[in-house]
């Protein structure tokens, strides 16, 4: 499962230019693209079966007086099938908490909309030896109250904050260790079978050079790609390499 996150990049025209260059042989099964709200509808129309289109954030509320927010129903109508939830940039700049993230996950899953829960520690948390505690808290508080059936539609993305946009990917061993930890926690909460079925993606400076090592790890089921998803060439290379190892 490869997910591109365009963040606040690309107008509608630029997004359509990207779609036009995308090879027609791609298949939507395992390729996801989280685009800005404004480009959702146009990209979903143009994407056809090439990829799944989604949002980068979603409201936990169904509708009402929430200025500036976008509901799941609005996203679905625009052609989105999934949303990132709790990206570290939203936690840092917009003060999203584990509790509000849990509400968003529940709302998505109750309305048949796939959420990708993002978790990750900062450089100082890692340095202080708090990585495990931080991730356990983000993951367990995020998924609180989800039934077995609901959690099976979830994907988790581990994105160490210090690796995002820095060019410094976590080593494959470091990422595997953390992914294993997440898998164990899911196993404890649910069952080994359920834990094995939930995709856990790695994110943080993934590019065509780093994906090969990362994707070979047993508990890494895909990648969440920021910068390298903005160019067709690098995005398609990542998809192609990942498929070689995981198909
Ligand atoms: P980069 O791939 O640019 O480091 O971004 C990662 C990310 O935040 C994806 O959600």
Image (cartoon, rainbow, N blue to C red):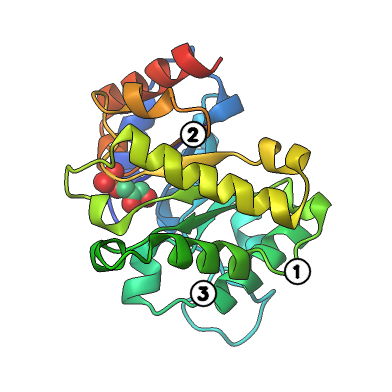
Mark 1 or mark 3: which comes first in sequence?
3
Instruction: Tell which tag, 2 or 3, sits nearer the viewer.
Output: 2
**Which residue is labeled 2 in the image?**
220
Q: Quadrant of the C terminus?
A: top right
What secondary structure is marked by label 3? Answer: loop
Instruction: Tell which tag, 1 or 3, sits nearer the viewer.
Output: 1
Among the 4 quarters of the image, the one containing residue 60: bottom right
Give the farthest residue toward the front. 129
Can residue 21 be seen here? The reply is no
Q: Which of 219 and 177 is in front in this view?
A: 177
What secondary structure is marked by label 1? Answer: loop
Residue sitting at x 46%, y 56% = 56
**Which residue is labeled 1 in the image?**
145
User: Looking at the picture, how far across and down is residue 28, in whole percent?
Assistant: 57, 26
User: Looking at the picture, how far across and down is residue 138, in whole percent?
Assistant: 52, 66
Residue sitting at x 75%, y 62% = 146
Among the 4 quarters of the image, the one containing residue 216: top left
Q: How crowded is mark 3: few (under 14 residues within 10 Å), some or many (20 or more)?
A: few
Direction from residue 172 to residue 153 in the image, left or right: right
Q: Which mark is residue 69?
A: 3
Q: Which of 214 and 19 is in front in this view?
A: 214
Mark 1 or mark 2: which comes first in sequence?
1
């Amino acid at each position: 499962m490869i997910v591109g996150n365009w963040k606040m990049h690309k107008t509608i025209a630029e997004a359509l230019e990207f779609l036009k260059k995308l090879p027609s042989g791609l298949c939507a099964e395992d390729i996801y693209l989280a685009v800005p709200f404004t480009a959702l509808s146009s990209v979903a129309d143009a994407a056809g079966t090439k990829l799944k289109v989604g949002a980068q954030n979603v409201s936990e509320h169904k509708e009402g007086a929430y200025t500036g927010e976008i509901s799941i129903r609005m996203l679905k109508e625009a052609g989105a099938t999934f949303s990132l939830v709790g990206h570290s940039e939203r936690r840092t700049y917009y003060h999203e908490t584990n509790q509000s993230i849990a509400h968003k996950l529940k709302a998505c899953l109750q309305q048949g909309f796939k959420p990708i829960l993002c978790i990750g520690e900062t450089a100082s948390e890692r340095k202080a030896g708090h990585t495990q505690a931080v991730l356990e808290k983000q993951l367990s508080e995020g998924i609180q109250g989800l039934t077995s059936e609901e959690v099976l539609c979830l994907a988790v993305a581990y994105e160490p904050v210090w690796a995002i946009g820095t060019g410094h990917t976590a080593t494959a061993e470091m990422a595997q260790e953390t992914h294993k930890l997440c898998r164990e926690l899911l196993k404890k909460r649910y069952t080994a079978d359920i834990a094995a079925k939930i995709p856990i993606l790695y994110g943080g400076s993934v590019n065509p050079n780093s994906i090969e090592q990362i994707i070979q790890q047993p508990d890494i089921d895909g990648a969440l790609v920021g910068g390298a998803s903005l160019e067709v060439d690098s995005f398609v290379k990542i998809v192609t390499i990942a498929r070689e190892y995981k198909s």
